[in-house]
Image: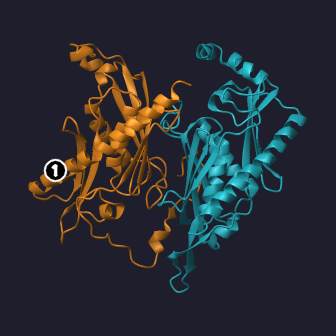
Chain colours: A cyan, B orange
């Protein structure tokens, strides 16, 4: 009977739960779904990670290639993110060129990389003006159950921490690069940005980590990206209902707590991988 | 890509570091020509897809999802004599749309997202191999979408995709005559031209010819066959097909187990 009511009046069904300060899957309003992360599973990629936020699954694979540095910044490398939302993850998407949601997500990830200074692009330069590393970060969503942005940011961070770049030296006589695939080193990750997404219901209620159904019923969404020193890196609020300043402050404090949870999880995972 | 404004731009072109690597490449280790790599198969893992399957064989990782049946796009097609067993007439039968994609990080060299000809060819091969197994007559004017994603290529990618697609269709509850099991083969170069079953990426790259067979194990009928490379005597190719079919039969019990487990899991979760 509940299932019938849910199909006919999804919003009313939801409101009944929200009145009791909980959600249909049993979570509280400020509770995240179970987060799991698996690092380094793709052998062909230079760095990879798989993140599951409840049912939402995102895999990130990073391939490093050589390229010429940009003409306006000759001592910087490239970090090129690409989020892929295909019919595999949800029936809503069509195969073909990236749709709107994928483009928005790709641009969001590019902004996070730029604003949080997660890696120093100068570290990626091998020879100023001639050769630099290009890190292609491909994020593929395997299962879309809401809150893609959080999962993608986390997957990107974990994959970047997992990337190992081979040693490159420029031979002075031939001016060609020489790559030693046996000697690899990790990237220097300066900050750890973590995203926290919220959905706004009925212009007033904020819930954390929305599932896909909740995203559809919400009147607005908000994503806050924090780094470890409690600094705000990025705020993404694509329209939707307005929020008061105090609500925004609550969101930011929740984001700080979330950062601690995620950092702890990541430290555990990377510590368990050390003996390699 | 220069004109692609939908993706974040990188440099105009880039080269993989392997081009500049010092040191020689590795040679494939000698092995038993009829060995199959241990397979891990799991069905029913994606919540948003009607049916899904993940297959891992050695280094090859494939994920496949099925959605539908959905009303078919494209014009109405006329009727005709009805098929046996209450099926729709031939012109109104359902369609199977297959899509094969390689993840950009799946091979040695990064492949930019718009796949190109090879992916379309493999998608067509998938469709041709899966059609004989699916009772499309039971889904008139509908289309079933099968999307296969290759996460890591460790050799025999098409074979793994075929098997995963068939498992995903079965997991979705689509009516089928039988499962489809795929097996890859490759023939090494001149000095020892033996056919190797289930080649690794290294063996495939150094092969003179390659073959993928798809078999419906219970009906014992070949559903698909795709081969390419240097020619050879017909007995050699016939021998290869026989080896491939034997490999498929050996793989079948693992897939049966996988589907039974998935069904049990669904049964246990259902009463909620």
Q: Does residue B92 appear to the left or right of A230 in the view shown?
A: left
B209 vs A214: above or below: below
Report x, y in % for residue A158. Answer: 63, 56
Dividing the picture into quadrants, the one containing residue B124 is top left
Residue in the image at 69% along x and 59% along y: A267
- Farthest bottom residue? A173
Residue A115 location in percent, x, y? 75, 54
Q: Is residue A208 left or right of residue B182?
A: right
Front-most of residues A37 and A100: A37
A59 over B232 or under it: above or below: above
Q: Is residue B7 left or right of residue A226?
A: left
User: Does residue B141 show up?
Assistant: yes
Q: Looking at the image, which is closer to me, A204 or A136?
A: A204
- The total of numbered circles placed on residues is 1
List the single residue furthest toward the right: A246
Q: Using the image, determine if residue A129 lies above or below residue A152.
A: below
* Foreground pick, A267 / A147: A267
Q: Is residue A78 visible?
A: no
Residue located beneath label 1 in the image = B242
Q: Dot 1: what SS? A: helix
Question: Quadrant of residue B193 in the image?
Answer: bottom left
The quadrant the C terminus of chain B occupies is: top right
Q: Which chain is disc 1 placed on?
A: B
Residue A141: % across, % down: 55, 43
């Amino acid at each position: 009977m509940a299932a019938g009511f849910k199909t006919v009046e999804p919003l009313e069904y939801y409101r009944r739960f929200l009145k009791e300060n909980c959600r249909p899957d049993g979570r509280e309003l400020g509770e995240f779904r179970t987060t799991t992360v698996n690092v380094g599973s793709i052998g062909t990629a230079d760095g990879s990670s798989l993140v599951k936020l409840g049912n939402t699954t995102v895999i990130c694979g990073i391939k490093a290639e050589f390229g010429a540095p940009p003409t306006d910044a000759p001592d910087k490398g490239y970090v090129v993110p690409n989020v892929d939302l295909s019919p595999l993850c949800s029936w809503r998407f069509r195969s073909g060129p990236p749709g709107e949601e994928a483009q928005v997500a790709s641009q969001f990830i590019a902004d996070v990389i730029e604003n949080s200074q997660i890696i120093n692009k100068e570290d990626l330069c091998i020879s100023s003006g001639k050769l630099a590393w290009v890190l292609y970060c491909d994020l593929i969503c395997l299962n879309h159950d809401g809150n893609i942005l959080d999962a993608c940011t986390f997957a990107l961070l974990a994959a970047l921490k997992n990337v190992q770049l081979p040693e490159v030296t420029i031979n002075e006589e031939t001016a060609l690069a020489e790559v030693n695939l046996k000697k690899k080193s990790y990237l220097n990750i300066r900050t750890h940005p973590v995203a926290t997404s919220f959905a706004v219901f009925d212009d007033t209620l904020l819930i954390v980590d929305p599932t896909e159904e909740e995203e559809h019923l919400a009147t607005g969404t908000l994503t806050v990206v924090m780094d470890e020193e409690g600094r705000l890196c990025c705020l993404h609020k694509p329209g939707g209902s307005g929020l008061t300043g105090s609500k925004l402050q609550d969101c930011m404090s929740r984001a700080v707590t979330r950062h601690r949870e995620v950092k702890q999880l990541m430290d555990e995972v990377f510590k368990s991988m050390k003996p390699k | 890509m220069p004109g692609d404004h939908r993706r974040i731009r990188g440099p105009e072109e880039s080269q993989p570091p392997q081009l500049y690597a010092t040191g020689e490449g590795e040679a494939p280790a000698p092995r038993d020509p009829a060995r199959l790599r241990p397979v891990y198969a799991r069905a029913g893992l994606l919540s948003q897809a009607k049916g899904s399957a993940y297959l891992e064989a050695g280094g090859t990782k494939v994920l496949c999802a099925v959605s539908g049946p959905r009303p078919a796009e494209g014009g109405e097609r006329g009727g005709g004599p009805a098929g046996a067993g209450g099926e729709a007439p031939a012109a109104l039968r359902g369609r199977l749309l297959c899509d094969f994609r390689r993840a950009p990080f799946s091979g040695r060299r990064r492949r930019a997202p718009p796949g190109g000809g090879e992916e379309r060819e493999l998608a067509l091969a998938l469709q041709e191999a899966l059609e004989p197994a699916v009772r499309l007559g039971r889904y008139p004017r509908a289309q079933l979408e099968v999307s296969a994603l290759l996460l890591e290529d460790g050799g025999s990618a098409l074979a793994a995709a075929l098997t995963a697609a068939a498992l995903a269709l079965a997991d979705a509850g689509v009516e089928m005559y039988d499962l489809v099991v795929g097996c890859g083969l490759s023939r090494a170069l001149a000095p020892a031209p033996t056919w190797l079953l289930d080649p690794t990426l290294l063996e495939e790259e150094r092969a003179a010819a390659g073959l993928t067979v798809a078999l419906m194990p219970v009906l014992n009928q070949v559903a698909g066959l795709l081969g390419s490379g240097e020619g050879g005597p017909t007995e050699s190719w016939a021998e290869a097909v026989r080896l491939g079919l034997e490999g498929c039969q050996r793989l079948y019990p693992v897939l049966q187990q996988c589907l039974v487990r998935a069904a049990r899991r669904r049964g246990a979760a259902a009463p909620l």
